C-alpha cells in the first residue's frame, strides 16, 4: 500500500440559503453560522478501487458524529451537514470503512474562521498498527489485504476470524500527571511491501534536526520482529542528548543473550529487564545537529547483530557493539521515533513543549531500499507533525522525511 504522509481536506462553510450540492464553492458569501456549515471531502485515493457502495464513513467534529454511506455520494464527493461553531478550534476524525472493516482514519484540528468559507486543514492518518485495522491478526492491515486481494477476515493457513488481541494495551496512554511525550513513525511491514527475504542488514540515514538544551531527548531507529510489540524482539540504535553524560549513541536488543563491547569505541554494555532480558551498549559519540549519519545493524554470525555508525562526511565506520539476540530473530518492520526522556507535566503539555526534530530517508534492507513510512503513533502530549523537506534538504536525490515533537521549528 503506497500512501501519502499527510492529507489535505477541503471544508466548505457556507450560508444556509446557498448550501446545496450544486453550490459554487469558489465564491465568497456572508459569514457562516453553526447551522449553515457543511463538510466536503473526496474519497481517499487509496480507497477508490473499492466500489463506492461498499464504503462508509463516521465523521466527527468536536465530538458531534454523523455516519454516511457511499451510495449517497456516487461521484465520490462526500458533502455532510455538520455544525461548526465560528471562531473556535475543532477536532476532526474520519473513520473510513470497507464493509464492516475499518481501513483508514484521518484526524487533526482546524480553526473555524467565520469569514473564510473554504478551509483546508492538513490531517494525519493511520491505516494500520493497531488490532482494529487487522481483522484476522496476520500483521497485514485490512487496507493492505483489500489492495492485495486476500481475505482480510481469515489469516493464511487458519480457519478462524477471531483475534485475541487487547488493542488497548498498545494504544498511546492517557494524559497522566507525568508524561514522556513521544512520536513514532512506522515503516510498513516488510513482507506486506513485497520484501520476503530475511533481513540480515538494515541501514538508515538519520539527522537530528534540533534538541532541547534543558531536557534529555532521544532519537532512534528500531527494528521490530514478529509478534505483538510489547513482547517482540527489538533492536534499537538511539542518539541521546543527556544533560549530565553528554551525547551518547546506544545500541540495544530486547530478548538477547549476550553483548560484546568494542574496545576501540570504549563501549559500556549491560543487561536490563527481568521477564524479557535484553542487552544494551552505550558509546560516547559527539553527534551534531543537522549532520547526516548512517547507522546500520548487520548479522555477522548466526543471531549476532553488529551495530555501526558513520558520518556521511567521513569514511570511518565506528562500531558500537555486537549483541546476540534470541535464536531465529526475524525483523518484520522498522520505525523511527523521537521522545522526551524526562517527565513532562500536564501544564507544560498545555503550554507547548520546546520543539525537537529529526530527519531520515527510506531505509535499506540488505541492498534494497524500503517503502515509504505510513503509520504515525503519538502520545497525547506529543503535538507531533510530520512531512517532507524539499529543495536543498534532499539527500542525493532522495526525499527527506521529518518528524517534529513540540512547537514550531
Image: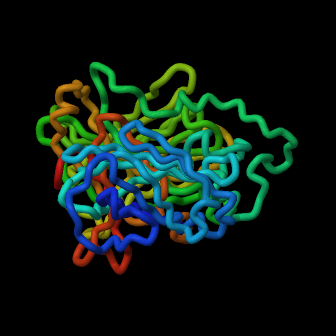
Q: Is residue 231 shown left or right of residue 216?
A: right
Q: Nearer the viewer, residue 130 or 44?
A: 44
Q: Return the residue found at the far bottom.
A: 397
* x and y, in percent, of residue 136 in the image: 73, 43
Q: Return the residue found at the far front.
A: 17
* x and y, in percent, of residue 206 in the image: 33, 59
Among the 4 quarters of the image, the one containing residue 324: top right
Q: Is residue 305 shown left or right of residue 124?
A: right
Q: Return the residue found at the far left.
A: 213
In which quadrant will I find the C terminus? Answer: bottom left
Q: Residue at x 47, y 40 (%)?
A: 65
Q: Residue at x 44, y 72 (%)?
A: 22
* x and y, in percent, of residue 57 in the image: 56, 51
Q: Is residue 378 shown left or right of residue 381?
A: right
Q: Nearer the viewer, residue 36 or 233?
A: 36
Q: Nearer the viewer, residue 139 or 369?
A: 139
In which quadrant will I find the N terminus? Answer: bottom right
Q: Residue at x 47, y 60 (%)?
A: 79
Q: Is residue 237 visible?
A: no
Q: Is residue 43 visible?
A: yes
* x and y, in percent, of residue 283 in the image: 30, 43
Q: Residue at x 42, y 38 (%)?
A: 64
Amino acid at each position: 500500500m503506497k500512501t501519502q504522509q499527510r492529507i489535505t481536506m477541503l471544508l466548505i462553510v457556507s450560508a444556509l440559503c446557498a448550501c446545496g450540492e450544486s453550490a459554487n464553492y469558489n465564491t465568497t458569501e456572508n459569514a457562516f453560522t453553526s447551522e449553515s456549515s457543511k463538510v466536503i471531502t473526496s474519497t481517499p485515493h487509496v480507497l477508490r478501487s473499492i466500489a463506492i457502495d461498499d464504503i462508509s464513513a463516521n465523521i466527527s467534529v468536536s465530538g458531534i458524529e454523523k455516519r454516511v454511506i457511499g451510495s449517497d455520494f456516487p461521484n465520490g464527493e462526500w458533502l455532510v451537514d455538520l455544525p461548526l461553531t465560528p471562531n473556535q478550534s475543532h477536532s476532526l476524525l474520519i473513520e473510513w470503512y470497507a464493509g464492516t472493516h475499518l481501513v483508514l482514519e484521518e484526524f487533526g484540528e482546524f480553526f473555524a474562521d467565520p469569514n473564510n468559507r473554504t478551509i483546508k486543514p492538513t490531517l494525519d492518518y493511520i491505516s494500520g498498527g493497531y488490532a482494529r485495522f487487522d481483522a484476522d491478526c496476520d500483521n497485514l492491515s485490512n487496507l493492505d489485504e483489500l489492495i492485495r486481494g486476500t481475505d482480510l477476515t481469515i489469516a493464511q493457513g487458519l480457519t478462524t476470524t477471531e483475534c485475541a488481541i487487547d488493542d488497548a494495551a498498545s494504544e498511546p496512554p492517557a494524559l497522566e500527571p507525568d508524561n514522556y511525550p513521544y512520536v513514532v513513525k512506522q515503516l510498513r511491514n516488510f513482507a506486506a511491501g513485497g520484501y520476503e527475504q530475511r533481513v540480515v542488514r538494515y541501514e538508515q540515514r538519520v539527522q537530528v534536526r534540533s534538541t532541547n538544551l534543558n531536557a534529555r531527548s532521544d532519537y532512534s531507529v528500531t527494528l521490530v520482529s514478529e509478534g505483538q510489540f510489547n513482547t517482540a524482539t527489538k533492536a534499537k540504535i538511539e542518539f541521546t542528548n543527556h544533560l549530565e553524560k553528554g551525547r551518547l549513541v546506544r545500541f540495544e536488543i530486547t530478548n538477547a543473550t549476550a553483548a560484546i563491547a568494542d574496545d576501540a569505541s570504549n563501549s559500556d554494555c549491560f543487561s536490563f529487564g527481568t521477564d524479557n532480558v535484553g542487552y544494551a551498549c552505550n558509546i560516547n559519540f559527539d553527534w551534531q545537529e543537522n549532520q547526516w549519519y548512517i547507522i546500520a545493524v548487520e548479522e555477522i554470525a548466526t543471531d549476532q547483530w553488529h551495530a555501526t555508525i558513520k558520518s556521511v562526511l567521513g569514511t570511518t565506520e565506528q562500531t558500537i557493539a555486537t549483541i546476540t539476540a534470541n535464536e531465529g530473530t526475524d525483523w518484520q518492520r522498522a520505525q523511527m521515533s523521537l521522545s522526551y526522556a524526562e517527565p513532562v507535566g500536564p501544564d507544560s503539555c498545555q503550554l507547548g513543549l520546546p520543539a525537537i526534530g529529526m530527519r531520515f530517508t527510506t531505509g535499506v534492507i540488505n541492498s534494497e531500499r524500503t517503502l515509504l513510512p505510513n503509520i504515525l503513533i503519538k502520545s497525547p502530549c506529543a503535538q507531533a507533525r510530520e512531512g517532507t523537506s524539499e529543495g536543498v534538504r534532499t539527500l542525493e536525490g532522495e526525499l527527506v522525511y521529518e518528524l517534529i515533537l513540540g512547537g514550531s521549528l
